[in-house]
Image (cartoon, grey):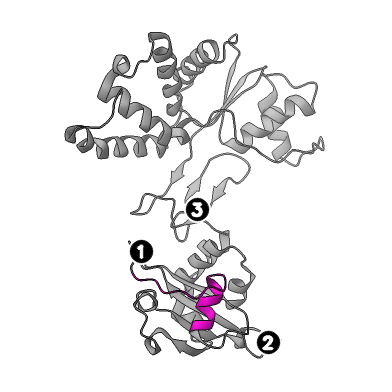
Amino acid sequence: MIKELTQKQKDVMPAYVEKWIGIGTSTERLNYYRTAEIINDYQTQILCKEKVPVLIVDNPIEAWVCCCLFDLDADTKWYNVAEKMYRFFDGNPDGHDMPKPQMPYQTGSFFASLFSFYNYFVEQFGYDALNISPDLARKYEIWERTSELGMIYPIDQCVIVSQKPTVIHLNENRVLHKDGAPALEYAGRGNFKLYYLNGVKVPEYLVMTESHKLTTEQFMAEKNADVRAEFIRKFGVENLLSLGKKIDSHENYDEPFWSSSEYELWDMETLFQSHDYAPFLKMKNPTTGVWHVEGVSPKCRTLRDAIKERFGGRDFTIEAMA
C-alpha cells in the first residue's frame, strides 16, 4: 500500500499538470484513421460490443443532433445521418423537435483532469505496485487514449465523435477566460460559442460589450452572484457605486476582519425608481481580491446591521482567518 510520496515524486507533479492541461486544451484536428483505431479498441475492449462505423462531426451540438435523428427519423442510417443533420441546421424542413442536448457517454480530452491523476500514479509507481492486473492495465490505456479525441457518443448504429474546439482561451489561473471574444469555440453548425470571464460562464453581452458601455440596468437584471461579481470586475466597482451614496464604512469600527474585507454600506436608491432607500454591502474577498456588491434589506441602516444580516442574524467577532 502506498502511504506517502517521496519529495522527488512531489516535485514532478507540475510537469503532469502542464502535460494534461496541454492535452485538455488541444485544438488539434482529428485524424480519421487514428480516431477509428482508438474507437474500435474502445468499443470491443471496454464496451464489449461489435465494431460499428465511426463518424466525425465538427462539434458536440452536431453530434447530439445526429444521435437524436436515429430516434426521430426511421430512415436515418449511419451513411446519411450527416446529410440529415445538415438539413436540420439549414432550416429544419423536416420539422424535427430536437431534445435538449446532454453530455455524452465519454468526454474525450475534457476528461484530462481525471486522466492526469491516473497517469501520474501509473508512471510513478507502475501497475504492479498499484495492484492493477494486466487486463485492467490494458483497458485503462485504451480508455486514456480517448483523451486524444473530442466528445464521444457511442450508439448502436455508429460512434459519433466530435472534433475538439477550434479556440480555447485560459487566463493566468488556467481557467476559461476571454474578454471581447468567446473563450471556447467550435467549428461547424449550431453556433457553438461559450463566453467565460475568470472561469465563470457569463452572458455573451458581458464579454462582447466594452466596459464603458455596460449599464446599471444590465447589472440589476443579473441574478447569479458569480456573474454579478464578473460584471462588477469589468464595469468597475467605483463606477457602479458612483451612482449611490456611502452610508457607513469599516473605518468607523475597530473590527480588523471588517477592515480586511473593506466593508462599506451604500445606498443605491438612484437605481430604483420605486425605492426611497436601497442599501448594498460592498466587500472585497481578501483571498482573491474580487469585489462584491450585494443587496441587503432596508432595515440595515448601519454596517453592523448589514453584516449581521449577511451572516444569518448572528452577531459574532472573527479573531483570525487561516
Left or right: where does residue 84 sit relative to residue 27?
Answer: right
Q: Residue 82 magenta-drawn?
A: no
| Circle number at residue 165 | none
| Circle number at residue 182 | 3
User: Is residue 271 depicted above or below 170 in this figure?
Assistant: below
Left or right: where does residue 117 sit relative to residue 310?
Answer: left
Query: Could you say whether the residue bearing mark 1 is in a helix, strand or loop?
Result: loop
Nearer to me, 169 or 317: 317
Q: Return the disc, 3 or 1, that comes first in the chain's sequence.
A: 3
Quadrant including the C terminus: bottom left
Nearer to me, 77 or 121: 121
Q: Return the disc, 2 or 3, that comes first in the chain's sequence.
A: 3
User: Is residue 156 depicted above or below 184 in this figure?
Assistant: above
Residue at figure coordinates x 42%, y 9% from the top left: 135
Query: Pointer 1: what residue?
Result: 287
**Amino acid, disc 1:** Thr
**Amino acid, disc 2:** His
User: Is residue 286 depicted above or below 145 in this figure?
Assistant: below
Range of residues picked out in magenta = 304-319
Mark 3 packing: few (<14 Cα in 10 Å), some, or many (20+)? many
| Circle number at residue 275 | 2
Nearer to me, 62 or 115: 115
